[in-house]
C-alpha cells in the first residue's frame, strides 16, 4: 500500500513521450499486482491456461510493457521484491484479511448474478505466488528485458539504482521510493490512461506523474530524514501511524520540532516504539550492490513454446509482439551505431 503522501506531494504531469530514451527501474511486484487485478474476465476471474496456470500478469508484461518499450523507446528494468522486513508482517496479514473478505464477497456477487460487483471485488483478491514470479522472470528473459532481484524491498533496490545513476528514475505507484531516496519517481506509467477504483466500481483518468525528490524537499524546507519521520507519523507498511495525524499535520510537526525525538511528549509517546528501526529501513535499506543491468536477446522459438504451447496464448498475438520487439531492437542497434559514425 505504501505511505499516503498525496496531500503534500509536488508533482509534474508529463506525457509518455517525455520519457523517450529514459531508463526506468520498475517496481515489478507492484506492476504485476496491477496486471493481476485488472486483466480479468467479465466475472472477475483471472486469465488462465487450460491447465489452470494464471496468466493475467504475463499478459500485462507481454502486451503492455512491450508497447511502452517499443512505442515510446523506453528502457525498462524490472526489480523484484526479496524477503520483506519483519516489520512488514502486520501489513502483510492485513492484506491477507482484505483478500479473504473480498473473495467471499466476490463469490456472493457471482451467485447473485451481479457481475459488476463481482468484478469490483475480484480485483482485490490477487495473490502473486512464487511460481507466477518465476514465470514473469522467464518471460522477461525470453524477451531480452533485464530484471534485478532485490534482497528485500524492490523499491529500495530501484531507488539505489537511481541514486547510482544506472537508471534515470524509479517507477511505482507507491511513494515509498522517495523515502528510500530515489532522485526521481515516475507514477502511473500506463498506456490506458485510466485506473479502476474497486470500492466505487468506476474508472478515473490517469496521467503519468514525475516527482523530483530534491524539489519536494526544497519546497517544504525539509530533509529526506525528516520526510521519513513524517511518513512514520502518518503510518507506513512497517508501522502504525499516530491516530489523528495526517500528512499535513505531520509535515507541520516535523518542520516545527525537527524530528520525532523532539516532539512534545504528549505526541511522542503515541509514536510506535520501533520508529527508530523503521527509520533505518528507509535510510539504510538492504540492497544488492552487485546487480547487473544486461539486455539479452529475444528468443523467438522459446517464446512460442513457453507462451503458446505451455500457456495457450494466441500465436498471432505473440507473433505481433515479437515483431514489435525485434523492430525496437533493430532501431536501438542502428541508433547505437550512428553514435560512432562521424
Image (cartoon, grey):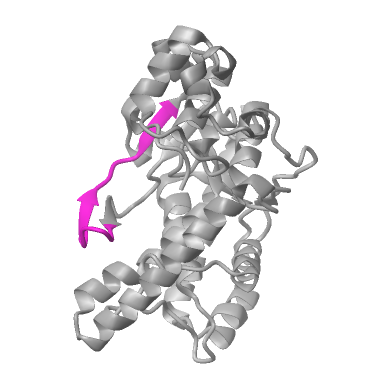
Does 70 appear above or below 35?
A: above
Q: For the view shown, which residue lies furthest in the right direction?
A: 290
At x 47%, y 15%, the residue is: 254
Between residue 6 and residue 230, name the one nearer to us. Answer: 230
On the image, which quarter does residue 137 sit in?
Answer: bottom right
Between residue 237 and residue 326, name the one nearer to us. Answer: 237
Quarter of the figure that contains the C terminus: top right
At x 48%, y 43%, the residue is: 2
At x 70%, y 45%, the residue is: 293
On the image, which quarter does residue 261 sit in?
Answer: top right
Is 69 inside the magenta-drawn segment? no
Q: Is residue 316 left or right of residue 304?
A: left
Image location (x, y in percent) of residue 235: 47, 37
Instruction: Give the total of numbered labels.
Output: 0
At x 52%, y 17%, the residue is: 265
Q: Which residues are magenta?
A: 197-211
Is 204 inside the magenta-drawn segment? yes
Q: Is residue 218 left or right of residue 8?
A: right
On the image, which quarter does residue 220 sit in?
Answer: top left
Does 211 appear above or below 82?
A: above
Q: Please say whether residue 327 is visible from this viewpoint.
A: no
Image location (x, y in percent) of residue 158: 61, 40
Image location (x, y in percent) of residue 218: 45, 11
Image location (x, y in percent) of residue 280: 68, 30
Amino acid at each position: 500500500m505504501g505511505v499516503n503522501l498525496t496531500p503534500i506531494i509536488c508533482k509534474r504531469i508529463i506525457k509518455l513521450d517525455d520519457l523517450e530514451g529514459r531508463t526506468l527501474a520498475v517496481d515489478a511486484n507492484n506492476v504485476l499486482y496491477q496486471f493481476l487485478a485488472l486483466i480479468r474476465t467479465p466475472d472477475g476471474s483471472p486469465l488462465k491456461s487450460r491447465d489452470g496456470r494464471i496468466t493475467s500478469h504475463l499478459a500485462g508484461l507481454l502486451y503492455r510493457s512491450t508497447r511502452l518499450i517499443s512505442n515510446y523507446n523506453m528502457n525498462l528494468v524490472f526489480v523484484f521484491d526479496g524477503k520483506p522486513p519483519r516489520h512488514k508482517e502486520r501489513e502483510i496479514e492485513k492484506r491477507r484479511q482484505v483478500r479473504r473478505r473480498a473473495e467471499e464477497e466476490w463469490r456472493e456477487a457471482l451467485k447473485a448474478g451481479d457481475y459488476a460487483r463481482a468484478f469490483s471485488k475480484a480485483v482485490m483478491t490477487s495473490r502473486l505466488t512464487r511460481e507466477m514470479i518465476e514465470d514473469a522472470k522467464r518471460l522477461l528473459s525470453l524477451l531480452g528485458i533485464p530484471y534485478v532481484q532485490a534482497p528485500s524491498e524492490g523499491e529500495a533496490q530501484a531507488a539505489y539504482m537511481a541514486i547510482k545513476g544506472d537508471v534515470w528514475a524509479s517507477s511505482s505507484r507507491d511513494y515509498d521510493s522517495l523515502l528510500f531516496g530515489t532522485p526521481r519517481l515516475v507514477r502511473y506509467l500506463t498506456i490506458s490512461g485510466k485506473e479502476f477504483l474497486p470500492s466505487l466500481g468506476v474508472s478515473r483518468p490517469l496521467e503519468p506523474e514525475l516527482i523530483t525528490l530534491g524539489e519536494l524537499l526544497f519546497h517544504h524546507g525539509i530533509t529526506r530524514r525528516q520526510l521519513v519521520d513524517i511518513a512514520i507519523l502518518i503510518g507506513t507498511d512497517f508501522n502504525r501511524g499516530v491516530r489523528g495525524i495526517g500528512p499535513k499535520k505531520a509535515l507541520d510537526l516535523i518542520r516545527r520540532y525537527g524530528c520525532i525525538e523532539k516532539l512534545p511528549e504528549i505526541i511522542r509517546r503515541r509514536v510506535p516504539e520501533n520508529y527508530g528501526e523503521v527509520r533505518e529501513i528507509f535510510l539504510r535499506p538492504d540492497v544488492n550492490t552487485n546487480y547487473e543491468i544486461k539486455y539479452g536477446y529475444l528468443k523467438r522459438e522459446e517464446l512460442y513454446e513457453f507462451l503458446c504451447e505451455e500457456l495457450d496464448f494466441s500465436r498471432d498475438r505473440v507473433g505481433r509482439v515479437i515483431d514489435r520487439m525485434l523492430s525496437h531492437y533493430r532501431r536501438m542497434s542502428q541508433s547505437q551505431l550512428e553514435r560512432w559514425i562521424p
